[in-house]
Image: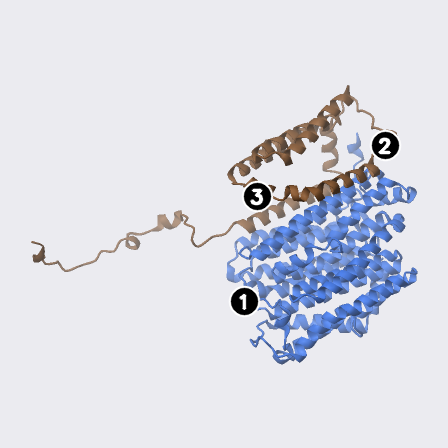
Amino acid sequence: METLIFYIFSAILIASALAVITVRNPVHAVLFLVLTFFTCAAIWLMMEAEFLAITLVLVYVGAVMVLFLFVVMMLDINISVLREGFVKNAYVGIPVALIVVFELVAVVGSDRFGLDQVPAPLAHAADYSNTKELGRVLYTEYVYAFELAAVVLVVAIIAAIALTMRRRPDSKYQDPSAQVRVRRNDRLRIVKMAAEKKNKASE
Amino acid sequence: MAIVNFEMPNFLPALPEMFVLGMACFILILDLFIKQQDRVITYLLSIATLVGAAFLTISLSDGERHLTFSGSFVSDPMGDVLKLFIYLVTAVVFLYSRDYLKKRDLFKGEYFVLGLFGVLGMMVMVSAHSMLTLYMGLELLSLSLYALVAFQRDSLKATEAAMKYFILGAIASGMLLYGMSMLYGASGSLNIAEIGAYAALNTDNTVLMFGLVFVIVGLGFKLGAVPFHMWVPDVYQGAPSSVTLYIATAPKIAAFAMVMRLLVEGVGDLHNEWQSLLVVLAVLSIAIGNVVAIAQTNIKRMLAYSAISHVGFILIGLLAGTDNGYSSAMFYVVVYSLMSMGGFGMIILLSRSGFEADKLDDFKGLNERSPWMAAMMMILMFSMAGVPPTVGFYAKLSVLQAAVDVEMVWLAVYAVVFSVIGAFYYLRIIRLMYFDKPMDTNKIEAGIDMRIALSVNSLGMLVLGLFPAALMQWCIAVI
């Protein structure tokens, strides 16, 4: 039964992953990617990695992919340009890809990575909590790597801000404090002028 | 519960890392409150951070090997020496870049903060004792470097270079991670010592071998060895010269440490397998690096190809697989980073605002403009070519000796033949400097601090070449 479910999810996973790179409409591609993540989460659930499965759905599907969808919708991608040369390159690309797949299967196929070589780990008891176990090692055994991950994120923020935030001289923005501080004399100039004589020509 | 068994890790060995991280964050925030004309404070603080880290590293170094953070962090004499050179090189890089950045309106706090985070990444790589830590350090370094390459936002070339670097770097990281996952799958551990213990017992494990191949591909990318070198010339050329200077020097030391930790400490017992892979990389790197460099008219590109060929030499030292080989590779990598620091420093010296001295023609007649600087450049070029009595000669000699010791005479002969071919393009620069008329007669603008540092840098190559024993002894002692 479990094997059957696994194969069903795997089939959906592979099919939707293929669809991501083959469908014409980029929005559809993003939606297929969402499906890929969902099925992937399901497979992780079967591996008793409940916390990671839920995080995948919450973070990737819930946040990252929604953002991604926005970006795709806002960009005006000309898909036909991207597809140019696909057929031309396919003559070389597909055989190369097939050879790579063949080689990978030959090396890490089931005769080397099969169940008789690497036995499946025993299922945990019903009261086993994946989340608890993760929490137990994250701040103890892996605290160094965990803190480093935080530093990597800090660097990402610094890089993003340093590369995108700039004051362009031609962009107009408000300076509220300058607006408040303004005096009448800054804006208004009262000019004394001699009275003009009535123009006789216009009469 | 297992929680009871958890022991508080010893934080002391990681004190330099923590210091650099703390200072980088402090400088980041302080920089917000500094006016542009006082920006030099950021620069001085960054240098002070590196000096402080050097003091901490020296005072904590007791010649022992300490493992902490559940075996994911190691502090040993080799790591300490490599870290000291990383601080030194980065500090000089900051010094060389100061004027260059000011003239290009790039003198910003982020430059130094990203540089310091890059140093932190390198330190983590040097002290990594688990594949996870190694990878985190690598990503920390790479991310800082990608951002630094793109730092000159209005330059199309720099943006293109950053894009190429980012994409190829991501592919390389993917390869490395895939290989690491295979090593993990085979050995069941991320810890480098445990992988080593497993590899010692299972030298014919196919999965381990499969992972090893991918790891070497990833390392080849990061080192810039042929056939994974495509990014090197484009990134070196496109990045602002001060960033090229940074990329070309300190990260090479960190990459060397990464190879030592993964291949030698990790799967050292599979030496027979990875030796043949490294031979291929070394043979191709030396040939392609030296031959293609001849055709370059841009000196940054030329030095990039020269970097590729130097990586070939470093690989020869590593693939020998003896302690002698490792220490001569370490000697080579340290010397190379000092040499290329001088070489790229020269480009910065000759650049002015709005003008990059990155063509070979810009070096024409340098002797007439500044005989002293021309002499300094000559020493650097001789050193890169491996002409005695400069240190470049000694570095090449010790690496080749290590290859001969393991009966790879053909490889040594091959390397010598190609370094003779390579000498052509180094000597061409000397010819341009001394025998051609200058095309550019403007005065050299660089400040006195840069001139002194660059002169010390170049003369150091000569002094180290005359007295290489001290550095060599150091490298032998810590391996």
Please name the residue that numbered disc 1 is placed on: B353
- Check contact, mark 2 vs mark 1: CB within 8 A: no
Who is closer to the viewer here, B198 or B16?
B198
Identify the chain of the residue marked 3, using the numbered disc in the image.
A
B204 horizontally vs B379: left or right: right
Q: Which amino acid does label 1 sit on?
A: Ser
Identify the chain of the residue marked 1, using the numbered disc in the image.
B
Please name the residue that numbered disc 2 is placed on: A118
Residues flagged by tags 2 and 1 on a common chain: no
- Residue A81, numbered label: 3
Who is closer to the viewer here, A36 or A158?
A36
The residue sitting at 64% across, 36% down in the picture is A21
- Residue B440, numbered label: none
Identify the chain of the residue marked 2, using the numbered disc in the image.
A
Dot 3 lies on which element?
helix
Q: Nearer the viewer, mark 1 or mark 3?
A: 3
Where in the figure is residue A201, as x and y percent of width and height?
A: 8, 57
- Badge 3: residue crowd in 10 Å (few <14, some 14–19, many ≥20): few
- Badge 1: residue crowd in 10 Å (few <14, some 14–19, many ≥20): few
Where in the figure is residue B21, as x and y percent of width and height?
A: 66, 51
Q: From where the camera sits, is residue B365 visible? A: yes
The image quarter containing residue B421 is bottom right
- In the rendered structure, the colour chosen for chain B is blue
Q: Give me the C-alpha separation between circle 1 and circle 3.
A: 39 Å
Q: From where the camera sits, is residue B22 visible? A: no
Where in the figure is residue B29, as x and y percent of width and height?
A: 57, 51
Scheme of image coloration: by chain
Q: Give me the C-alpha separation between circle 3 and circle 2.
A: 46 Å
Who is closer to the viewer here, B53 or A146?
A146
Who is closer to the viewer here, B287 or B453?
B287
Q: Which amino acid does label 3 sit on?
A: Val
- In the rendered structure, the colour chosen for chain A is brown
